[in-house]
Image (cartoon, rainbow, N blue to C red):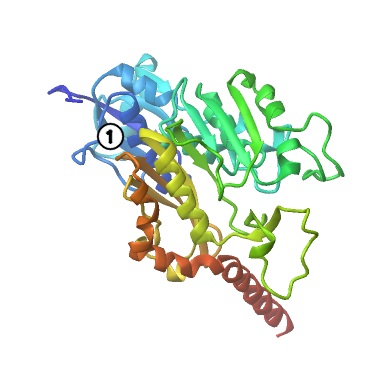
């Protein structure tokens, strides 16, 4: 979209958390509402104050109706050459010129602590909304989560008016059965499920369905169904990475189940999981649709070349959240830029990225090796 010759300038007050996620979110939302973030616009890295050129006040207001990374936006009146001059200028700033606030209150109102149905890996509310914004989720979109868990990511997309759908391999989680995750509660109640979570926030009308399904063997007809795929795949820390398989796939030396019991639980390597996810996104996203997912990495070995690649998907952003001194997870946002062809299914095998990321199949072991070393170090210090 061509921008007008004269753009209005605005002062954006940013939240001082999730710093790497701020710029991709603002870029995605400006694009969603008809604006464009250009390299000539001023940003200040870690600073909470950004100056943006935006085509219209409507776009600025729409931006603030979605962002959870920005607090407020102001029409820019002037600058101060000293702290005193700046303070005086801001003190005299008319209240009516403060045009809009961001959606920071969503972080509290959708807090996991208040949610009806949660699990060990339920996503933080703020990050859930950031993921939906990176995915450019809008009204009447269809958003899918293939590792849906307790459905936290569906809630954020439904809040923005998208219809939501998910699958997971865990029967008990999908049906809200088994042991509860809350303290002082042994078993889940009869109405603890994903639909009840959406009902809690008045979003049940956006609930399509959730099914028990194996992400490594999606049972979909060929076609493009989704405007966005937003997910947090398991990476073996609090929840195991599993897939279904046959008796023939069980390694020798392990006792087999009766032949009548067909599905068995097998390990699912991280590299296989992520390339299955990319292939699935390339096949089922509409052109221009986005895939947003978390990629765990062992930071001493991480390089950008390790991010999984696909010929149908363009990397939009790559943001880091620290997990420990030696591990992190990266929020990867990709956009479908070309229609899927059968030959694209195995393109990753020809990519250097595939071989490099295979080294992270042992992410769980590397994660806990760091924990073990830290405990040993602390014990040694306490004895000295």
Q: Where does the C terminus fall, quadrant-wise?
A: bottom right
Which residue is rendered at x = 57% and y = 47% of the image? 215
Residue in front for this viewpoint, 362 or 53:
362
Residue 21 position (above or below residue 2): below
Residue 280: % across, % down: 46, 44
293 vs 56, left or right, is right
Q: Residue at x 52, y 41 (%)?
A: 127
Front residue of 162 and 65: 162
Q: Residue at x 45, y 39 (%)?
A: 15
Pointer 1 residue = 51
Residue 237 sits in quarter:
bottom right
Q: Quadrant of residue 168?
A: top right
170 lies left or right of 72 = right
Q: Is residue 18 visible?
A: no
**On screen, residue 334 above or below 72:** below
Query: Which residue is more in the foreground, 255 or 39?
Result: 255
Most extreme residue toward the left is: 5
User: Which residue corresponds to the image point at 63% horizontal and 28% vertical from the top-left?
Assistant: 209
Left or right for 106, reference 24: right
| The N terminus - image quarter | top left
Sort mark 1 into few (<14), some (14-19) or many (20+) by Cα contacts within 10 Å.
some
SS for callout 1: strand
């Amino acid at each position: 979209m061509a921008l007008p010759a004269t753009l209005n300038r605005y002062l954006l007050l940013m939240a001082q958390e999730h710093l790497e996620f701020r710029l991709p979110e603002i870029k995605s939302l400006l694009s969603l509402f008809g604006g464009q973030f250009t390299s000539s616009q001023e940003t200040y890295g870690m600073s909470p104050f950004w100056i943006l050129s935006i085509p219209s006040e409507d776009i600025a207001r729409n931006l603030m109706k979605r962002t959870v990374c920005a607090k407020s936006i102001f029409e820019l009146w002037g600058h101060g050459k000293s702290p005193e001059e700046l303070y005086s200028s801001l003190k005299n700033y008319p209240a009516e010129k403060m045009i809009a606030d961001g959606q920071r209150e969503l972080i509290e109102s959708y807090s996991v602590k208040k949610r009806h149905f949660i699990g060990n890996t339920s996503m933080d509310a703020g990050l859930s909304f950031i993921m939906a914004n990176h995915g450019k989720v809008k009204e009447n979109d269809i958003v899918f989560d293939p590792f849906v868990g307790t459905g936290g990511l569906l809630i954020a997309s439904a809040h923005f008016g998208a219809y939501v759908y998910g699958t997971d391999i865990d029967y008990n989680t999908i049906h809200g059965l088994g042991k509860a995750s809350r303290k002082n509660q042994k078993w889940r109640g009869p109405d603890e499920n994903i639909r009840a979570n959406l009902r809690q926030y008045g979003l049940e009308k956006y609930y399509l369905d959730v099914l028990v399904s194996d992400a490594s063997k999606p049972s979909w007809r060929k076609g493009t169904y989704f405007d966005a795929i937003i997910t947090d795949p398991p990476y073996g820390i609090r929840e195991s990475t599993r897939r279904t398989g046959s008796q023939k796939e069980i390694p020798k030396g392990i006792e087999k189940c009766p032949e009548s019991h067909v599905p068995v639980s097998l390990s699912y390597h991280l590299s296989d999981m992520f390339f299955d996810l990319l292939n699935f996104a390339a096949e089922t996203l509409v052109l221009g649709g986005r895939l947003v997912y978390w990629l765990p990495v062992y930071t001493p070995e991480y390089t950008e070349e390790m991010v999984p690649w696909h010929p149908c998907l363009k990397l939009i952003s790559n943001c880091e959240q620290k997990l420990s001194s030696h591990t992190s997870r990266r929020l990867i946002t990709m956009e479908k830029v070309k229609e899927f062809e059968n030959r694209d299914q195995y393109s990753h095998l020809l990519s250097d990225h595939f071989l490099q990321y295979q080294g992270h199949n042992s992410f769980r072991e590397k994660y806990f090796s760091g924990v073990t070393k830290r405990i040993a170090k602390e014990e040694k210090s306490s004895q000295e």
